Amino acid sequence: MTTPDNAFQDLAGVFSSRDNNVLEIEIIPSSLGSSFLQDGHSVGITKKALVQAFTIARQHFIKHLMPMSEDDLRVEHLKKGLDSTSPPDPVITEIMLLFDCEHLTACNWRKRRLLAAVTHCLNGADPASTIYLLETELTLMASYQCSPLHRHTKSPTLWSHRLWVLSQLFQVRSLSPLALLSLERAELDIVLRAGELHPKNYYAFNYMRQLHLLLANTFTDVPCSTMDLALVTPVLDWCLANPRDISGWMFGKYLLEHVPDQRVRQDAIGRVLRFARDVGWEGESLWTFIDQAIRHFDLEIVVDDVLRHGTEIPSPELPAVV
């Protein structure tokens, strides 16, 4: 029988050795005969063992982490740890957030820790370690948000934290237009994966809207229209593969609002209409998107061309996503 200490050490070992990799974590049934399973970056743990690990992590958190001052949170102190027998400080809150993704106290402690590193960096320290720390935080969030964990994929606390981490990363790391495009595409992949795991995932798609605004306000010298255009095709692909998901469709409409080319909007709506016509789709979400999009963009002519006359609309060339 697994003890609370053993359950905690099992999870602590996984998170401590994660480096910058994304884990896939799943709650497994106790009928499998083992409370903890690991195969590479795939981890399974029973609900009971997770509760046991959380109780130990919470004890460590109250005893060691909550009393820490801002000076204690400097990166050099965190790297050393409290002593050789204690688990690394960040691991404690990682286990707590795995059990309770809305644990604001644990999440805010991680913010304080990262903010101490960013402040140290802005005061002249080498940014490499701070950048790595922030990127590692993003992969930790991805481990929660892209795993089959029902609450984590739709957690407003975790999505808000992810956006905050990116805002801090933009302060210490300069990005080229190509790197920005790659970053936004990678973030979209995470959101779409979370949308697959938890349908109608409003919080995930709202995060993409907020990220879009953050990029536009932070990198004012980079035209956002090119990045927006590169996202249209993958978003439409996802929506057509998940036609009942209203959150995905509404994000698709939001994206089209920020694409300046009316031909791109026409092609996108025409593609959705052809799909609906060919498969005889009657679901409300898809038709809500079509109704709102054609009214917003004044594209009633597309409905006439596709549904009444069955003509094909020439497709404009979209830029390749690097």
Image (cartoon, rainbow, N blue to C red):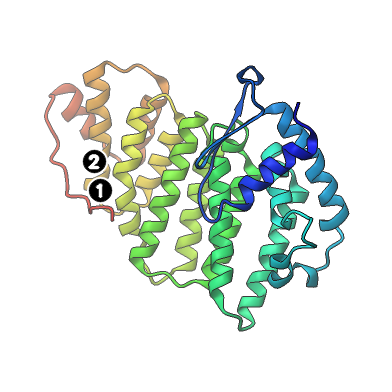
Q: Residues within 10 Å of mark 1 (few under 14, many from 20)?
A: some
Name the residue: 52% across, 30% down. 198
For residue 288, side relative to residue 205 (left or right): left
Q: Does the rendering let one see residue 290?
A: no
Numbered label tally: 2
On the image, the x and y values in percent for residue 24 come to: 52, 38
| Mark 1 and mark 2: Cα distance apart in space | 6 Å
Q: Which residue is mark 2?
A: 266
Going by the numbered disc 2, the residue's amino acid type is: Gln
- In the picture, measured across the screen, residue 97 lies left or right of residue 130, that is right
SS class, disc 2 = helix
Mark 2 neighbour class, 10 Å CA radius: few under 14, some 14 to 19, many 20 or more: many
Q: Which residue is mark 1?
A: 262
For the N terminus, the image quarter is: top right
SS class, disc 1: helix
Residue type of the residue flagged with mark 1: Gln
- State whether residue 164 is above or below residue 38: below
